Amino acid sequence: MTQDELLHLKLLAIELRKKLLTMIVSGGGGHTGGSLSCIDILVSLYFHALRIDPVDPESPGRDRFVMSKGHSAEALFCVLAEAGFFPEAELASYGSFGSRLYGHPTMGVPGVEMPTGALGHGLSIGVGMALAAQRDGVANRCFVLMGDGELAEGSVWEAAMAASHYRLDNLVGIVDNNGLQISGKTGDVMGLSPLAERWSAFGWAVEELDGNDIGGLASALDRLPARTGAPTLILAHTIKGKGVSFMENQASWHHGAPTAQQLGQALRELEAAAAGLRAAV
Amino acid sequence: MSAPGFGSRQAFARGLLDEARANPSIYVVTSDARGSASLGEFARALPRQFVEAGIAEQDAVGIGAGLARSGKRVFVVGPACFYSARCVEQVKNDVAYAGLDVKIVGVSGGVSYGALGGTHHSLNDVALYRTVPNLSVIVPSDSAQAELVARHLSRSSGPAYVRMGRFQIPDSYAPGEASFAFGKAGLLRDGTDCAILSCGEALHRALSAAAELSSRGVSCAVLDLPTIKPLDEEAVLRAARLCGAVVTVEEHYARGGLGGAVAELLAERLPTPMRILGFPDSYLPSGSSDELFSHCGLDAEGIAKSVAAFLASLDKAGAP
Ligand SMILES: [Mg+2]
């Protein structure tokens, strides 16, 4: 990726942060912290790695993306609209009666592969999609984004076993490892460490990186599969609430809507960050 | 436990294998149940269309959903006790809510596992799954019909739950006359005093009961309702109107299953005196499937007795 492209994606991620916060405020609530922590991952996927066509969202040869941490729907919707799957104006309907933009992704939204929101489902679905591609001898890949708190669901590990059993090197799991969940620190709620070792022990090729660094994410996504014959797990260390000072690393921002004043401050901080990026060029 | 013989699950597997040979997009997913689901031959003949998930029903259903989202017609097959409990959330969200072409096939359902006990009985599966929107519920009544259900589902899209038993059972339909039309009841016996509505492996017992009652001058219609959802409402209403008395018989808790579906319909559309025969709201003693049916008054004799007592209470024919 060129420096220009990287700058463009970084600015885009900031722009999408502003959009999702605005959307959460207008919709009266949303999963703020997790949407902010995973937006750089989504930008790296949708605007760099995924082979998808918003004009033909059901194209059989497309890469699949499953938002297993479905509660970060606001981030996904902003990304899908930006990518052209549906008109951006529709984002304003989020939170209103009859909108197809529920608080979790559903099948009615163009670009959404699966309805998610109950945690621990996405990786099994990804195994099925990757297995279909493997058996059909086609090149499409499947990416599944999970939260770290989600990893306490036993079904995740059932799927982790199946993925390495079937040598699904077309399957990529990404953990948005922001260290927090609704009740507090993941380590306090239910310890997950050593996370990289656990995925390795389940037969995955593990890539550990900064999940808020689009450059690093993009280059990891360029090197897939990390190991031939094995599924890849990208352990993406992120900051929950990333980009808004008073939201960063605060479990209390797992769900909620900023006040008008808080939104104003958040937008100012994000605009300042964008200005800083432009000035650095 | 006696030898299973050629039961519904074997017939279903035979139909499915035959259909899958002609349609490479038909996939089977199972969870270490290829033996109990009679899928060994499928696995050997069509390995590319067969997926072993290990003992992991949640994963099996999720994998099935992922395969279906990639254009496969998927049958997730294993014991009904596990597929109607362990993975209900996956069935609800990943199959029914997503509207994907996944059929959940529970074998050895009801009290098939007999003395293996309560962990292995599935007596609330119909109650659970008929309350999941977008999911059909089918309980084939004999092995010939089970094969027809497999063929029907192999040629139709959308989510379904199928429940079958474990053992060879008497055919409810005469040789060559088994039928299955999705969402339609089958009339197996005409009668005017009482309509007996049944499905699955209770049906042959209901038919025997009707024959026994007939010898005592009680005329019972017997309807086979293999599709519990969507229910053949017109057939149920017609039978209720004709007989004025309805008894349902099923291998399921008496609450929430076929009887519940029929009661909901009749209560709203045509209130009719009714009895619901099924298993009690309790865990059962140790015993074979047949022994448990008898213990709970669900063998032919017990059904006949209940029907006669019901009709007597209505001052109808058959009063002892
Ligand atoms: Mg988290």
Image: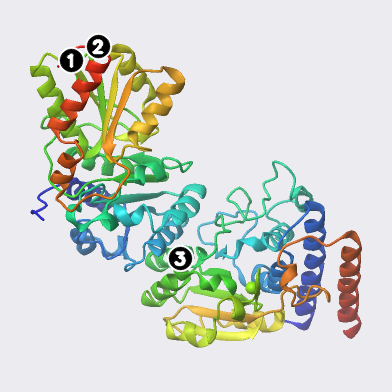
| Both labels 1 and 2 in a single chain | yes
Give the quadrant of residue A138: bottom left
Residue A142 placement, left or right of B159: right
Other residues around mark 1 within 10 Å, as few (<14) / some (14–19) / many (≥20)? some
Q: Amino acid at mark 1?
A: Ala
Are the residues at dot 3 and dot 1 in contact (C-beta closer than 8 Å)?
Answer: no
Q: Which mark is residue A124?
A: 3
Up/down of A107 relative to A136, above or below = above
Q: Quadrant of the N terminus of chain A?
A: bottom right
The secondary element bearing badge 3 is classed as helix
In the rendered structure, the residue with mark 3 lies on which chain?
A: A
Say which of marks 3 and 1 sits in front.
1
Q: CA distance from mark 3 to mark 2?
A: 58 Å
Say which of marks 3 and 2 sits in front.
2
- Relative to the observer, which residue lies in front, B166 or B22? B166
Residue at image x 43%, y 42%?
B135
Residue A248 placement, left or right of A136: right
Give the quadrant of residue B53: bottom left
Q: Amino acid at mark 2?
A: Asp
The secondary element bearing badge 2 is classed as loop
The secondary element bearing badge 1 is classed as loop
User: x%, y% of residue A39?
Assistant: 71, 70
| Circle 2 residue | B315
Q: CA distance from mark 3 to mark 1?
A: 58 Å
